[in-house]
Image (cartoon, rainbow, N blue to C red):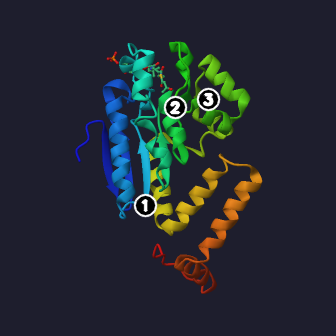
Amino acid sequence: MNFENIILERHGKVMLIRLNRPNALNALSPDLTKELGLALDQLEKDDEVAVVVLTGSEKAFAAGADIKFMKDLTYMDVYKMDFITDTWERITSFRKPTIAAVAGYALGGGCELAMMCDFILAAESAKFGQPEINLGTIPGAGGTQRLTRFVGKSKAMEMVLTARLIDAQEAERCGLVSRVIPNDKLIEEALATAQKIAALSMPIVMMAKDSVNRSYEVSLSEGVHFERRLFHSTFATEDQKEGMNAFAEKRKPIFKNK
Ligand code: CAA
């Protein structure tokens, strides 16, 4: 399939998806979010793809939902089209690992899209924020919910109520991003991280992802119960036998995704 608003680059078992609306700082138009969803549908079925890295440009991961598209929409328009729910959230149900590699602006929907990924690697140039309040609206793609869970109430509230942007260092300090990387090394490091994951047993990686994500949905005891059942189930796989035998035999494991 040909896409106009995203670029797909295959790096072995890692697919790099570049958001590509350079004239609009990658503002997330309906066409872009639709293409991203369609691409993820394809990649979910593609056994040759193990991990997805989502990135933008050096200047912007994405500067938010497309304001020029939204500005004249009425309540009935957004309600009927089920705006945001209609195309934006495919990545949250994607079963393989997703890494957001963020340089430049990740604002509004851009910050929200990054937070929908499994983890965020930030270039030193990254700037995160939820500036919707300046436009007379509020975050609509999970910003008030995910940001609060990641950085805590006080900082999330300040960011949402004042539109203050935070830089990469502050984002790392407060747990929004896992690591800060020099600008010129962001993609290289994101791909290397993804390759490390791609070399592991995919079903086990997917179970680990599932289990971490579960912690955001349920109580601690329910989450630990879920984890315990998945942990037990890994013992039914060939890859668990291979992983532990390889350790005992002092050799590298060869995982078969079985
Ligand atoms: N939607 C549409 N177009 C956008 C855009 C957006 N979110 N952000 C930037 N652009 C466009 C600009 O209009 C401009 O286009 P033209 O050249 O045709 O005028 C182009 O991208 C370059 O932008 P700037 O000239 O503004 O670049 P800058 O370097 O001076 O400023 C910026 C960069 C501070 C990020 C500024 O562009 C900005 O404030 N953008 C809007 C950020 C924002 O409010 N995001 C939240 C959107 S609402 C949302 O996301 C709702 C939700 O939760 C789902």
Whether residue 181 is visible here, answered yes or no, is no
Residue at 61%, 72% (x, y): give it.
Answer: 233
Within the displayed image, which quadrant is ligand 1 positioned in? top left
Q: Position of residue 83 (x, y in %)?
A: 43, 28
Structural distance between the alpha carbons of marks 1 and 2 = 26 Å
**Residue 244 relative to residue 132: left or right:** right
Crowd band around label 1 with a 10 angstrom C-alpha radius: few (<14), some (14–19), many (20+): many
Residue at 69%, 48% (x, y): give it.
Answer: 218
Crowd band around label 2 with a 10 angstrom C-alpha radius: few (<14), some (14–19), many (20+): many
- Using the image as rendered, state which of residue 116 and residue 176 is in the foreground: 116
Q: Secondary structure at mark 2?
A: loop
Amino acid type, mark 1: Ala
Q: Which mark is residue 67?
A: none
Residue picked out by circle 2: 141
When asked about the image quadrant of residue 150, the answer is top right
Label 2 beta carbon less than 8 Å to ligand 1: yes
When asked about the image quadrant of residue 210, the answer is bottom right
As drawn, 199 above or below 181: below
Q: Tell me which label, 1 or 3, sits earlier in the chain.
A: 1
As drawn, 40 above or below 5: below
Residue at 32%, 55% (x, y): give it.
Answer: 10
**Residue 197 relative to residue 74: left or right:** right
Residue picked out by circle 1: 50
Q: Residue furthest right?
A: 221
Structural distance between the alpha carbons of marks 3 and 2 = 8 Å
Residue picked out by circle 3: 144
Q: Secondary structure at mark 1?
A: loop
**Residue 219 relative to residue 85: left or right:** right
- Using the image as rendered, state which of residue 82 and residue 132 is in the foreground: 82
Label 3 beta carbon less than 8 Å to ligand 1: no
Amino acid type, mark 3: Thr
Structural distance between the alpha carbons of marks 1 and 3 = 30 Å
